[in-house]
């Protein structure tokens, strides 16, 4: 994607994804401007003072704003070419306990991003989704599912304008806050002799933040509107993770937590008729299309009926040694 001379706005730009994306773009392209849009001035101040952003201060803009505030979103999107929507409430228990807040940010916020993009000159919008939006069993997943549907339907309003909306879906990022790797790490550092594993059958995908960023750049470049881009990535068993992080350590099963699944699902059997496989990713195409541009890319191969893609039925698996070799990617973020 040619990001040179482009103005890019990242909602939630001070978050883990926002940091990684912004740094990547500054290092690999020569954008006109990157606008970080988020609420907390301290996070923005801290980010602005990091070396990489100080070195590119002429290209960085920090906009205080809430995705719940449609007028502010519209103001921020004036002159913007591309929008990456990463702002979200994403902790499962917090969304469960504060459902109305989760809806305001993840659903109403998504609609505000769409309206603002349609009302200004924005050309591409890529929204971040999660495996939890697939057959959701918790409110976080349900709000992200609604958000996905809003972005897919937004293509109906594009008309003749050069704008499209697409989605990038991935699972827990290795090392992300509140996930299993930082938990195991802190327990090991405290000298615990036994690590808690929710269920010995539990599997997860392994994706690093840079891999997530690359998929977003692919979506920016290739989307025609309404696609969901999903990386092909390896799976691991959570028990093997404990062994990789502390060889020989004992584990105990503590039972699955509310709102959790044994495996992460990315593509369901119901999605299969609309899913195409590429070398390094899948694309789920929209079931309802609104213009002639929304056709499957001929380079892809439709997956067979009955196909599904989850961390339990993956064909690519990480051994304990493979996990050890990639633990350095799980930096604290
Ligand atoms: N991390 C993962 O493992 C993972 C996995 C799959 C999908 N995702 C998705 O990826 C996206 C980014 O996740 P992340 O890990 O980067 O999250 P994060 O580190 O928690 O960052 C969230 C960002 O959103 C901002 N934000 C929150 N509420 C906002 C609001 N109402 N208005 C404006 N900004 C708001 C936060 O800044 P302020 O608090 O200052 O506003 C922060 O910059 C999310 O959509 C998430 O659902 C993440």
Image (spheres, rainbow, N blue to C red):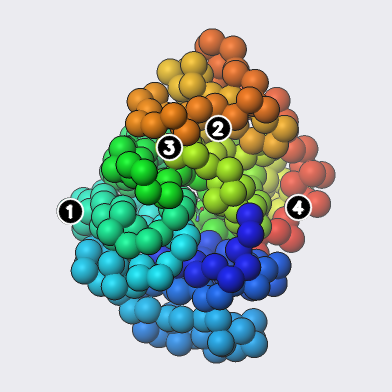
Any part of residue 113 in sight: no
Q: CA distance from mark 1 to mark 4?
A: 38 Å
Q: CA distance from mark 3 to mark 2?
A: 10 Å
- Helix, strand or loop at label 4? It is helix
x and y percentages locating residue 119 in the rendered image: 28, 59
The residue indicated by pointer 1 is 100
Residue 121 or residue 73, whichever sits in front: 121
Q: Is residue 105 above or below residue 258?
A: below
- For ligand 1, the image quadrant comes to bottom left
Q: Nearer the viewer, mark 4 or mark 3?
A: 3
- Helix, strand or loop at label 2? It is strand
Badge 1: residue crowd in 10 Å (few <14, some 14–19, many ≥20): few
- Helix, strand or loop at label 3? It is loop
Q: Which mark is residue 326?
A: 4
> Which callout, 1 or 3, points at the residue further toward the start of the chain?
1
> What's the residue at 25%, 72% (across, down)?
72
x and y percentages locating residue 320 in the rendered image: 77, 42
The residue indicated by pointer 3 is 226
Q: Nearer the viewer, mark 2 or mark 1?
A: 2
Q: Is residue 298 above or below residue 111?
A: above
> Which callout, 2 or 4, points at the residue further toward the start of the chain?
2
Badge 3: residue crowd in 10 Å (few <14, some 14–19, many ≥20): many
């Amino acid at each position: 994607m040619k990001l040179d001379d482009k103005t890019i706005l990242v909602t939630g730009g001070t978050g883990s994804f926002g940091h990684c994306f912004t740094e990547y773009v500054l290092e690999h392209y020569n954008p006109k401007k990157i606008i970080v849009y988020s609420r907390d001035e301290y996070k923005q101040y801290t980010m602005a003072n990091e070396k990489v952003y100080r070195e590119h201060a002429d290209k960085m803009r920090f906009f205080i704003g809430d995705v719940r505030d449609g007028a502010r979103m519209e103001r921020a999107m004036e002159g913007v070419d591309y929008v990456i929507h990463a702002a979200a409430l994403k902790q499962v228990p917090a969304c469960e306990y504060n459902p109305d807040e989760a809806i305001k940010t993840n659903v109403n916020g998504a609609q505000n991003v769409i309206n603002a993009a349609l009302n200004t000159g924005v050309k591409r919008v890529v929204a971040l989704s999660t495996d939890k939006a697939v057959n959701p069993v918790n409110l976080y997943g349900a709000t992200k599912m609604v958000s996905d549907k809003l972005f897919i339907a937004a293509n109906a309003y594009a008309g003749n304008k050069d704008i499209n909306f697409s989605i990038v879906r991935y699972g827990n990022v290795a090392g992300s806050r509140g996930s299993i790797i930082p938990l195991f790490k802190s327990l090991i550092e405290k000298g615990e002799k036994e690590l808690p594993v929710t269920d010995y059958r539990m599997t997860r995908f392994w994706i690093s933040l840079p891999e997530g960023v690359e998929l977003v750049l692919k979506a920016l470049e290739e989307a025609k509107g309404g696609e969901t881009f999903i990386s092909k990535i390896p799976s691991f068993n959570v028990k093997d993770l404990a062994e990789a992080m502390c060889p020989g350590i004992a584990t105990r099963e503590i039972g699955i937590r509310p709102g959790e699944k044994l495996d992460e699902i990315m593509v369901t059997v119901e999605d299969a008729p609309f899913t195409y496989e590429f070398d390094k990713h899948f694309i789920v195409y929209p079931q309802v299309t609104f213009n002639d541009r929304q056709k499957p890319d001929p380079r892809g191969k439709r997956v067979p009926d009955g196909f599904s893609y989850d961390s339990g039925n993956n064909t690519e698996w990480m051994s304990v040694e493979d996990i050890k070799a990639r633990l350095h990617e799980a930096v604290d973020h």
